[in-house]
Structure formats: structure tokens, C-alpha cells
Amino acid sequence: MAERSLDAQVVVLRKTKLGESDLILHMMDASGSALEAIAKGARKPTSANSARLELFNSAQVSFARGKNLDIVRETRLLQSHEQILADPVRFATASVMAEAADGCIQPELEVPRLFPMTQVAFAAVDRSQEQQAPLLVAAYLLKLTGLLGMRPSLLTCAGCGEPLAGTAGGKMRFSYGDGGALCGECAQVLSTAPVSAAVLLRAGWLLGAAFEDILQASAGAEAWDVLQLAHQWFAHQTSLRLRSLPAFHSLCGCIQAPSGL
């Protein structure tokens, strides 16, 4: 396996305090792999890296080899997100995305499409309105699991592959353990949960839609139920608990988990 370059384009997902003034940066590099490094003095107000390596930023970083972790040597800011940092709802939205990505990626396990998708997602959050937040998070969770090989079947039966028939106000069946939505015949032999056809249709659209298109669409009455579906799918497939999600629900006015899928 080729040795990792000392230069990398990264997006910052998480920061951990180290000592009095240093930070451990948890990042995603351009290959979609996890990368960690120490930014010495980054917590000092006079440090140039303090702003360049803020959460959700994209940067070109040069590293020096360290004993355990590489050390940030030089940085060049590529994309910052002042609107996210200045607004609690946008910050909570991006935090859920960053936590989900950080929990899934691994060192030297490449998922190349994940890096540009995450950059585009953060850029969309920068320009979003509060009512769009649940759909943006739902879209990211669905797309993330899809890129990791855990794409849910939302518009065709996960059992037999046939297109699903149902009205927007009707009820369908969904299996988190068997791949997604199911037709009536397949649902008889698999463990399922009820879900409205409207939620499935919106989730299926989110999975394939560009983030720019999501910003132009109305949130819809089913937005929080779509997020619940996406989160439960993500949690079942990855076994990860998103600690940032309760704060996101609270800030967006959805203190209790949605029901009535």
C-alpha cells in the first residue's frame, strides 16, 4: 500500500483539545478516508490555523511526520462556512452530518465520492433556511449509507425488486433489516414496520436529488418523518448513535422524536 502523502486536501469533521493550546483534528481527506493530525497552538487566538482549520472547513494541508500522529505544518483555506458557525440551527445541521461521516470513515479505506458530497452538503447548509434542515440531514444520511454500500430500496420492493404501488396517503411496509420497502406479498414473510407512501416517495427523491435541488424544494409536512426513517436506517446499518441529533431536534422545534411514519 502506498504511503500517505504529506500533503492532503481535507474537510474538518471534529476537533479534540490536547494540552493547553493544541488540537487533534479529525478530518476526511480527498479519498474519503479518515485522517487525524495534531495542530500545535491552534487554540491560541493568534494562531493562523485557528480559523483555517475551523469545523466544516475545507483546506489544503501539509503535514510533518510525527511519532504517533502527523503534525500540521502549513494550511491553505479552500472553503469556509461562516454562516454555519454563526447560526445555531445551521451549526446543529452540519454537526449531525459531520458526526455521521466521522463515525463511518476509516483510515486508508477510500470512499472517493464521499469527500465532494460532504463539501457540497456543508455548502448547502450554509445557504439553507431552518425549515430545510431535516431534509438536508435526511438526504446526507441516506446518501452516506448509499456510498458505503448500504443503499436502501425505497421505490422498489427490497424482496422481489418489483416497483412499489401505493398512493401518497397510503401505508406501505418497511424493513430496516431486509433492505428497505416491501410489497404486500414480501411483507408477509419479513419483519416490517409501517411507513406512509409519502415518506417513502420523499426519501427516494432525496436519495437521488442534488443538494441544490433540495434547497429549492419545499420541506413538506412529512420532513421530520423522512428524517426519522433516514436516521433509523443509518443507525440500523452502522450501529452508530448520533449524539448530536437530540440537540438538532430541540433547536429545530422537534423536541420529541416524530411518530406515525
Image (cartoon, rainbow, N blue to C red):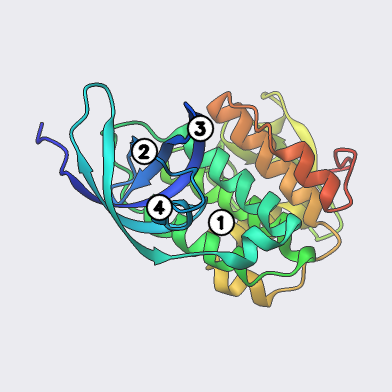
Callout 1 touching callout 3 (CB < 8 Å): no
Q: Disc 3 marks which residue? A: 16
Q: CA distance from mark 4 to mark 2?
A: 9 Å
Q: CA distance from mark 4 to mark 3?
A: 15 Å
Circle 2 — which element? Answer: loop
Badge 3: few (under 14), some or many (20 or more) residues near its Cα, within 10 Å? few
* Residue 112 visible in rendering: yes
Residue 52 drawn at (x, y percent): 42, 57
Residue at (83, 50) in percent of width and height: 251
Q: Quadrant of the N terminus?
A: top left
Q: CA distance from mark 1 to mark 3?
A: 32 Å
Circle 1 — which element? Answer: helix
Q: Amino acid at mark 2?
A: Lys
| Chain-order first, disc 2 or disc 1 | 2
Residue 17 drawn at (x, y percent): 51, 31
Q: CA distance from mark 1 to mark 4?
A: 35 Å
| Chain-order first, disc 3 or disc 2 | 3
Query: Which residue in the rendered view is the most extreme toward the front?
Result: 46
Of 152 and 239, nearer the camera is 239
Q: Which mark is residue 49?
A: 4
Badge 4: few (under 14), some or many (20 or more) residues near its Cα, within 10 Å? many
Q: How many marks?
A: 4
Residue at (61, 27) in percent of width and height: 236
Q: Disc 1 marks which residue? A: 207
Q: Disc 2 marks which residue? A: 40
Q: Amino acid at mark 1?
A: Leu
- Image height of 96 relative to 36, above or below: below
